[in-house]
Amino acid sequence: MELFASYDTIYPADTVEWCPIPEYSNVFVCGTYKLEEASKKKTGTINLFSLDSQNKIKLVQSVPEDAVLDLKWNSFIALGSGKILLAAALSGKHVSIYRLDENGTDLSLSLFTSFDLPKTDGESHMSLSIAWSRPYENGSQSIAFSDSCGYITLVNLNDRLIRSFKAHGFESWIVTYNYWEPNILYTGGDDCKFKCYDQRLRFDKPVFENKDHEQGVTTCSSNKIRENIIVTGSYDENIRLWDIRNMKHSYNSVKVDGGVWRLKWEPNKEEYLLSASMFNAAHIIDTSLDVANICQSFGEKNNRLYYGADWCHHDTQFEHDTKSKNKKVIATCSFYDHRLDLFFVNMKL
């Protein structure tokens, strides 16, 4: 593991996401969240970066916004518009979808559309996480948002509300789709519950509900290669692996000694997991052969809170370097010291 670049994001950083579209594999975004103590106003930025051929970080654009809780690129080119889209979960009364524009060699983010959030007793909810579905058979896509009042809201790209329903008693920290079946989505909440819903059943009740985690369920991800495998993480410091054919209990777990905020599968083989482990930095977990073992830990721990971590999806800058064929790029971001770090990691672990 080698730290090769760092950047001061000015505001506290809490989410980082590499663009999954191959032509833009050197592009990534980092979201920030700043609370003004006096006014209690929440503000933030969506920072668009590129990584050049000399492996230097370039800030391309900084978009002022409400505080940013989560950012997710659409892995599929949007039907009809042909646009590369980025969804932002925000602290305000709406969620925003940005498109990536290209003018010559210049890139920028511009607002594509936005959606209002549900209200409870006249008060708007705060969105906490975002998920894009795979396209349905008719080519349409859904976006799901979890929020601070325990709701999940599904919308499509032409502003039509699909459904908003109460999933958890407290904050719904995470929502994600089953990669293989866009009608299935998973949720995790501060009530320690991990749930599954099928939108064909109108969300009246969950398909399953599990409380293996002893504290709030903060993250979940469906594996894009192993069809039946999903993973969850929690404030209880445990990462759990699940087989959707038997959801009574997880089939393996590993403790990372830090609350788990985000989990990302390594994009090519999806056998390794990257964990942003809050006060205990970041980890890479080997999940091959049905195990769950920490194989690398990295990042400074002093006065740092790791909320974001992600893999560069394609690493095209290494394709012609035979000495670097196993090298991956990883980005992490930490909150208190508003720092974005980029690492090289040798995946011949």
Image (tube, grey):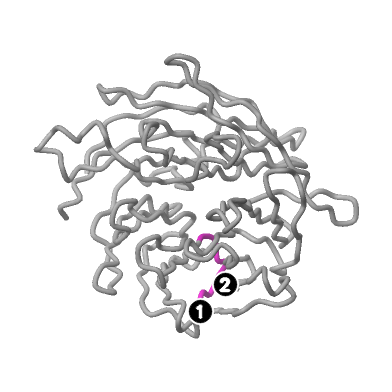
Residue 25 in the image: above or below residue 265: above
Of helix, strand and loop, which mostly describes the magenta segment?
A: loop
- Closer to us: 176 or 160: 160
Mark 1 secondary-structure assignment:
loop
Write down the region rendered in magenta: 212-219
In the image, what residue type sits under mark 1? Asp
Extreme residue toward the left, this view: 323
Circle 1 is placed at which residue position? 212
218 drawn magenta: yes
The residue lying at 55 percent from left, 53 percent from top is: 135
Q: Are marks 2 and 1 in contact (CB under 8 Å)?
A: yes
Picture quadrant where residue 71 is located: top right
Residue 197 point in image, percent of width and height: 63, 71
In the image, what residue type sits under mark 2? Phe
Residue neighbourhood size for the residue with mark 2, other residues' Cα within 10 Å, grouped as few (<14), some (14–19), many (≥20)? many
Q: Which mark is residue 4?
A: none
Q: Quadrant of the N terminus?
A: top left
Mark 2 secondary-structure assignment:
strand
Extreme residue toward the top, this view: 104
- Closer to us: 267 or 234: 267
Residue 72 point in image, percent of width and height: 53, 44
Circle 2 is placed at which residue position? 194
34 drawn magenta: no
Tell which circle, 2 or 1, labels the residue nearer the N-terminal end.
Answer: 2
Residue 126 in the image: above or below residue 5: below
